[in-house]
Image: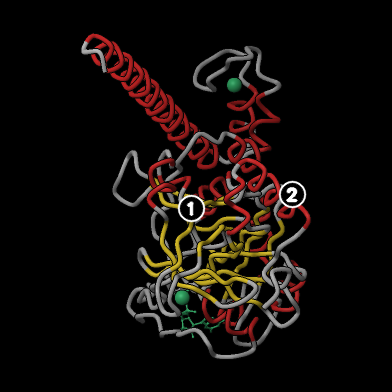
Amino acid sequence: MSLETLGWGPDLDLALSNAVSQSPSATSLVPGRVVRQQRGLLTVQTAGPAFLARAAGRLLHQAQGVEALPTVGDWVLLQPPASGDGEALMLAVLPRRSVLKRREAGSEHDGQLIAANVDVVFLVVGLDGNFNPRRIERALTLAWNSGATPVVLLSKADLADDAAERVLEVEALAPGVDVLAVSARTGLGVEDVRTRVPPGRTGVLLGSSGVGKSTLANRLLDAARLVTQPVRPEDDKGRHTTTHRELFVLEHGGLIIDGPGMRELGLWGDDAEGLAQAFADVFALATGCRFTDCGHQNEPGCAVRAAVENGTLPEERRANFEKLQREQAFQHRQTDAAAQREHKRMQRNQANAGWARTRSKRRGE
Ligand SMILES: Nc1nc2c(ncn2[C@@H]2O[C@H](COP(=O)(O)OP(=O)(O)O)[C@@H](O)[C@H]2O)c(=O)[nH]1
Ligand SMILES: [Mg+2]
Ligand SMILES: [Zn+2]
């Protein structure tokens, strides 16, 4: 498989030559893309074979948090195993053009990477019951934060008699985002999805378990290579059939990442761009507020409140915006606190190193 088939392009030529100029030993390393992740185990596809791979101690040591560690979609530099069936060592992660991440379920501080170097985030929402506008707004914020372009797929359109209305409803809460009704069963919209990932481009399927991500991926692949499972009829929740994350090359040359469903989509990290994009309408309104630092609470001359009162902005959307903004602000403080801790740690290390030098001088070492 050629690296181009996996999405390699001129930007990566540049990233590779930079990596080599910084660390000449990198010339002996082999580039590849992380195509599969099952728990901690990664598979990297190179221009030659695919290898099971783990992060080298040096990479783990240099990494400041999970964000710097390889995830599906990453381009990495490998040292192939000495023997045929050993594990390869990943020594570097090439700079990313996007990274999709969330707060780890049940944690305030820790994050989880979902996929890297994606161009399109397909937010898959089932039309068969689980339809929550606030969740869509949250997911879109997360998707915009990644640096990729979100597209909403309203799946199982064959089961809904109001698909066209739902498309309009979601368009209203997703400014600047394309919304497509799709059905993996009838094939409706599938061709349209395919054209969103031209050859060499990568899309990732994001959504709750049971919304039809794997069925759609199968349909895109035109082969039943992924396992799908019926949803439990009593609650429309999926069974989490997909336990690993995997990148597939489609016949037309586009790439798609399928993975396990995600119930929780907490914001994580310091990006603020996502909110500005997902709530572009609210940001535009806010420019009309009398005070530039308006909190849209009880301030006089608040254009956001006025829009709620005259019915142009739904109150639920305003409230969700406020909630996500708070969550983002909390994340911002967390990131600041983590940076301060890191700074202190480095100062301490330097102080310790200085003290050790003084001590060895005294001893005449
Ligand atoms: N009617 C209908 N059912 C679908 C469609 N796509 C998926 N399903 C069904 O929904 C269930 C869950 O699908 P799956 O792809 O495993 O969901 P995932 O957890 O998001 O990967 C399976 O029973 C599928 O057959 C569709 O377009 N129409
Ligand atoms: Mg699945
Ligand atoms: Zn205001």
Within 10 Å of disc 1 (Cα), the crowding (few <14, some 14-19, many 20+) is: some
Q: Which mark is residue 291?
A: none
Q: Position of residue 123 (x, y in %)?
A: 58, 61
Residue at figure coordinates x 45%, y 85% from the top left: 227
Q: How is the image coloured?
A: secondary structure
Quadrant of picture, ligand 3: top right
In the image, is residue 287 above or below residue 111? Answer: above
**Residue 52 falls in image quadrant:** bottom left
Q: Quadrant of the C terminus?
A: top left
In the image, is residue 271 above or below residue 287? Answer: below
In depth, the one of 11 and 360 nearer the eye is 360
Q: Which mark is residue 14?
A: 2
Within 10 Å of disc 2 (Cα), the crowding (few <14, some 14-19, many 20+) is: few
- Marks 1, 2: nearer the viewer: 2
Whether pointer 1 and pointer 2 mark residues with C-beta atoms closer than 8 Å, the reply is no
Dot 1 falls on a residue whose secondary structure is helix
In depth, the one of 258 and 308 nearer the eye is 258
Of all residues, the one furthest to the left in this rendering is 363
Label 1 lies in ligand 1 vicinity (Cβ under 8 Å): no
Q: Classify residue 271 as left or right of residue 244.
A: right
Label 2 lies in ligand 2 vicinity (Cβ under 8 Å): no
Q: Position of residue 184 (x, y in %)?
A: 60, 82
CA gap, disc 1 and disc 2: 38 Å
Amino acid type at mark 1: Arg
Dot 2 falls on a residue whose secondary structure is helix
Q: Position of residue 21 (x, y in %)?
A: 67, 43
Q: Which mark is residue 135?
A: 1
Amino acid type at mark 2: Leu
